[in-house]
Image (cartoon, grey):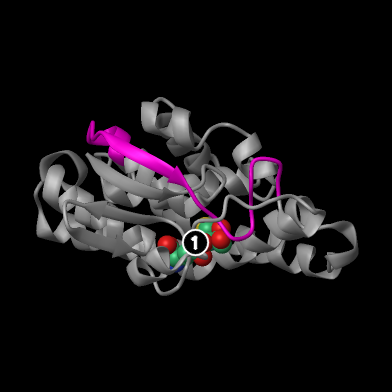
Amino acid sequence: MIDIWGRPTSICTQRVLWACAELNLEYNLTLASATMGHQGHISRGHAPFGVVDTDIYKAMNPNRTVPLIKDGSFILWESNAIVTYLAMKYGAADLYQDNLQILSQSIGWMAWTNEHLEPPLHTFVMELVRLAEELRSPETVEPARTEVENWLRVLDEHLQDHAYVCGDLFTLGDITTGASVYRAHLFDACPPSLSNITSWQKRLRERNGFLHHVAPREFHLG
Ligand SMILES: N[C@@H](CCC(=O)N[C@@H](CS)C(=O)NCC(=O)O)C(=O)O
């Protein structure tokens, strides 16, 4: 049984939970966060899940962020590293066809997502949903939208010749990239003209891990 600390509203936690679903891994999830709780963000006066502020947690993850996993005595933080570890240990055939080149390409798409999509998506979530009104900077939203759209055009062109980000088969690269692009859709930042992305997202939406851990709108808009 793998122990996971995180929260369902965290896109990084969603990646790990989706990977567990793909691999049929059993896990125990401890809700943890310094900024979000059952009702929403702390800037609106809501209580956070906590846990991350304890010394025990800091000893496992000095960043005090989520997600974090413990597999036996092995502790790991940083969501894409966790997804990669789980794939390599429990699902090399399922999540990258046991192929070093496909694994490396997947890691490339995961890094691409963190580098290019996540910063502007974070702006959407904070500025349009989570922050209390008086703490918002509305002028940051449109530049974020332009940035997301520009990078999604790169992905759409790539998907012209590929059913999934690394070729004809689903990989761990689709987990990280797919969850973030879904979030972009929810914020109307993925133009319908990007039809290759639309077809790819439709394929991802058939997967149980996506349906349970990423699809619920309240995980992104709540
Ligand atoms: N690059 C890290 C980011 C970790 C991170 O910043 N996680 C966010 C949630 S997505 C977090 O911990 N937010 C503060 C909190 O919930 O206390 C990863 O992928 O794991």
Quarter of the picture holding the N terminus: top left
Q: Secondary structure at mark 1?
A: loop
Q: Write down the region rendered in magenta.
A: 20-40
161 relative to 151, above or below? above
In this rendered view, identify the residue nearer to me: 138 or 59.
59
For residue 82, say whether it is visible: yes
Q: Going 77% across and 63% down the picture, which residue do you hit?
A: 141
Q: Is mark 1 within 8 Å of ligand 1?
A: yes
Instruction: Count residues near mark 1 (Cα–Cα under 10 Å), then give few for <14, some for 14-19, many for 20+.
Output: many
Across and down, in percent, residue 109 comes to 36, 60
For residue 161, say whether it is visible: no
User: Circle 1 sits on which residue?
Assistant: 52
In this rendered view, identify the residue nearer to me: 203 or 132.
132
Q: Going 49% across and 61% down the picture, which residue do you hit?
A: 52
> Is 32 inside the magenta-drawn segment?
yes
Across and down, in percent, residue 105 comes to 25, 60
Quadrant in the picture for residue 2? top left
- Left or right of 217 in this view: 71: left
> Is 94 inside the magenta-drawn segment?
no
Quadrant in the picture for residue 23? top left
- The majority secondary structure of the magenta stretch comes to loop
Across and down, in percent, residue 207 comes to 37, 28
Q: Going 40% across and 54% down the picture, which residue do you hit?
A: 158
Under mark 1, the amino acid is: Val
In this rendered view, identify the residue nearer to me: 91 or 157.
91
Quarter of the picture holding the C terminus: top right
